[in-house]
Amino acid sequence: MRHFLTLKDFTKGEILEIIDLAVKIKKETKGNIFKKYMPNKTLGMIFEKSSTRTRVSFEVGIYQLGGVGLFLSSNDIQLGRGEPIKDTSRVISRMVDMVMIRNNSQDELQEFASYSKVPVINGLTNKFHPVQLMADYLTIVEHKRAENLKVAYIGDGNNMTHSWLMLASKLGFDLSIATPIGYEVDAEILNLAQQFAKESGAKIVVTNDPKIAVKDATVITTDTWVSMGQEDEKEKRIKDFSGFMVDSNIMGLASSSSLFLHCLPAYRGYEVSEEVFEKHSEEIFDEAENRLHVQKAIMVWLDSNR
Ligand code: CP
Ligand code: NVA
């Protein structure tokens, strides 16, 4: 049985196999063909944090596959009142066929998975957001940017950045990350990415200068400066991230046909300017929609690899 907790557990071949499956399932869905790949299967969806895309895409996705999703807010289940994660896992995984969790701690997610009888999917933790990266890569493939791909990430060294590190180092494309001083990526995750990169041929650059990162990039991306749970640091972060907004000056230093991606929600006037966001809204909302298609593929893949 496989879980989907971080892309570090997946080979290049497996990642591309899931992407191919997503392309197929998306084509069927667009043609109003809803194949019941998971008839009568149940997906438990545990949320410790807010969500628009993750909740809607998983709930609609499992329904379209012939199953049903259960929305379980940690405020409403006993987990929120202190029932141990390992007990929650042993109960829920006896009743459902798959679990998706959005929680604070990657370690707790790993713990949940280690006690689970069914596949567990990471719907975002403090460390990684792997389902988002699968949607991002599907968007890159659809917009025909997968060849000679050079991604520039400008902003906070957070769960999105760590997931970009895993995707780039597994697939073997170039990734330049520019963060302000003090907001660099986790050193252990960077180290791991550099090890994978030796095998895949990925070129990973980390810098504190957005201009260096963005040079010749074919895809530019960013994320909020204030992730969920960091609200108390908002004022300080806004000061510290000065000069890191992706605006038309920054975009002007990249390749002229470059894409701009954003996992959303976006905060215009902070990590991205209104102008850049609206100019690239087509690919941004393709990316958001692709959460649905790629997660259906992830669920089908996990279900068939049991
Ligand atoms: N990008 C993303 O995961 O969005 P939500 O927080 O709305 O799920
Ligand atoms: N880094 C953001 C991503 C939101 C989808 C957060 O963790 O809040």
Image: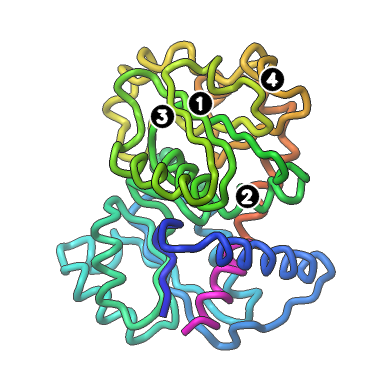
List x then y, in percent, for residue 133: 54, 50
The residue that mark 1 highlights is 154
**SS at badge 3:** loop
Q: Quadrant of residue 294?
A: bottom right
> Could you tell me which residue is drawn at 44 percent across and 82 percent down?
97
**How far apart in space, not on screen, are marks 1 and 3 (Cα)?**
7 Å
Q: How crowded is mark 3: few (under 14 residues within 10 Å), some or many (20 or more)?
A: many
Q: How far apart are marks 2 and 1 (CA)?
A: 17 Å
- Residue named by callout 4: 275
In magenta stretch: residue 303:
yes
Q: Distance between the residues labelled 1 and 4?
A: 17 Å
Q: Mark 2 points at which residue?
A: 137
Which tag, 2 or 1, sits closer to the chain's start?
A: 2
Pointer 2 local density, CA inside 10 Å: few below 14, some 14–19, many at least 20: many
Left or right: 12 with respect to 128?
right
Q: How far apart are marks 4 and 2 (CA)?
A: 24 Å
Q: Is the magenta stretch mostly helix, strand or loop?
A: helix
The Cα atoms of the two marked residues, 4 and 3, are separated by 21 Å
Magenta extent: 294-306
Residue that mark 3 sits on = 156
For ligand 2, the image quadrant comes to: top left
